[in-house]
């Protein structure tokens, strides 16, 4: 009896580790863990919740997604590694994937896209499918849907109109080599500072400015210590909700299809949420008294950054970047 009890306990443990269990009808239930890096009020989390609800509905409760916001299960790189080992199943990720597949750098290359519409056409076209296939092959992740990010803008305590205004400008950038290089090329003095330390660095004058999407400028309170948001719009980018290839393939074919249908619904939800969020955030920032400077020579910034962009792109990425620019010029 003791031996039987020990074996049943081991079996239960293995079921938990593998993410499978049985419901009261004796049907197998797959439980996936989704770890992401925004808080519960962010549109990434709200999209993830909507997607999880749709998956549960579509599969009649046979696939459940448990969501862990704010990086509860680890940082982005470790999460992707954990998905590959089967400890986590899904995540929300973007240009960090260039650590696995070089073409992912195009997800956040400065001045690649003329507009959000141009970016959408690329994501949903041949180049987007190439990037998704590379992610699948090289990182072991299947992109299920994409979420647009607001353009990155430069904040400061004086209006910035062109690269001439930021010569020697001390600014924070994230730890992305391409970002460091393009701002250096434009004449600024980029510094690597953790996002959680940026407010204090601005407040104490350690740096003069920083660059981020408006939603992060608002949620981190940077408008309290910066007078201007300068619409450089230097990076338009997107991220994916992804699932491990093996995790997806372990589902029966009908459940795989139901997950993909849930992703299509969540894609529409994410786009509506993005458009609503952009307007709400901008109105909030204006109400808080920050000056939004629209008089920015974006073409001058692009020209200043091009040498660094080209230096950071391998020949294949340079060719794709050229194609993206051409499609933008053609009005795609």
Image: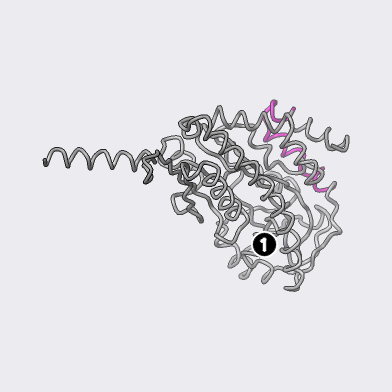
Can you tell which quarter of the image residue 305 is in?
A: top right
Name the residue: 84% across, 59% down. 294
Q: Residues within 10 Å of mark 1 (few under 14, many from 20)?
A: many
**Looking at the image, residue 230 lies above or below residue 35:** below
Q: Majority secondary structure of the magenta segment?
A: helix
Name the residue: 69% across, 68% down. 223
The segment highlighted magenta reads 300-319
Quadrant including the N terminus: top left
Q: Is residue 27 left or right of residue 54?
A: left
**Looking at the image, residue 293 lies above or below residue 10:** below
Is 314 one of the magenta-colored residues?
Answer: yes
- Residue under circle 1? 217
Q: Residue lying farthest right?
A: 330
Q: Is residue 141 left or right of residue 122?
A: left
x, y (%) of residue 30? Answer: 43, 40
Quadrant including the C terminus: top right
x, y (%) of residue 237? Answer: 69, 45
x, y (%) of residue 112? Answer: 76, 40
Is 302 one of the magenta-colored residues?
Answer: yes
x, y (%) of residue 255? Answer: 52, 35
């Amino acid at each position: 009896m003791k031996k039987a009890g020990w074996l049943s306990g081991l079996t239960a443990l293995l079921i938990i580790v593998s993410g499978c269990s049985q419901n009261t009808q004796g049907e197998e239930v797959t439980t996936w863990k989704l770890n992401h890096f925004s808080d519960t009020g962010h549109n990434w989390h709200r999209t993830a919740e909507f997607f999880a609800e749709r998956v549960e509905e579509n599969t009649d409760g046979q696939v459940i997604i448990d969501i862990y916001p704010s990086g509860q299960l680890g940082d982005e790189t470790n999460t992707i590694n954990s998905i590959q080992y089967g400890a986590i199943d899904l995540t929300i990720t973007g240009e960090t994937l260039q650590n696995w597949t070089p073409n992912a750098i195009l997800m956040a290359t400065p001045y690649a896209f003329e507009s959000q519409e141009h970016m959408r056409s690329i994501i949903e076209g041949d180049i987007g499918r190439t990037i998704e296939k590379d992610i699948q092959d090289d990182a072991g992740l299947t992109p299920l849907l994409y979420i647009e990010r607001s353009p990155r803008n430069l904040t400061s305590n004086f209006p910035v109109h062109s690269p001439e205004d930021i010569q020697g400008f001390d600014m924070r950038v994230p730890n992305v080599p391409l970002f460091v290089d393009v701002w250096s090329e434009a004449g600024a003095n980029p510094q690597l500072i953790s996002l959680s330390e940026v407010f204090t660095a601005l407040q104490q004058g350690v740096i003069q400015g920083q660059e981020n999407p408006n939603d992060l400028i608002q949620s981190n309170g940077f408008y309290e210590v910066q007078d201007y948001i300068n619409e450089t719009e230097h990076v338009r980018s997107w991220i994916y909700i992804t699932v491990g290839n093996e995790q997806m393939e372990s589902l029966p074919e009908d459940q795989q299809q139901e997950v993909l249908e849930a992703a299509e619904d969540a894609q529409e939800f994410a786009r509506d949420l993005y458009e609503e969020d952009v307007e709400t955030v901008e109105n909030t920032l204006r109400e808080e008294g920050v000056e939004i400077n629209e008089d920015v020579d974006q073409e001058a910034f692009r020209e200043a950054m091009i040498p660094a962009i080209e230096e950071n792109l391998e020949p294949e990425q340079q060719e794709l970047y050229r194609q993206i620019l051409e499609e933008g010029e053609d009005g795609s």
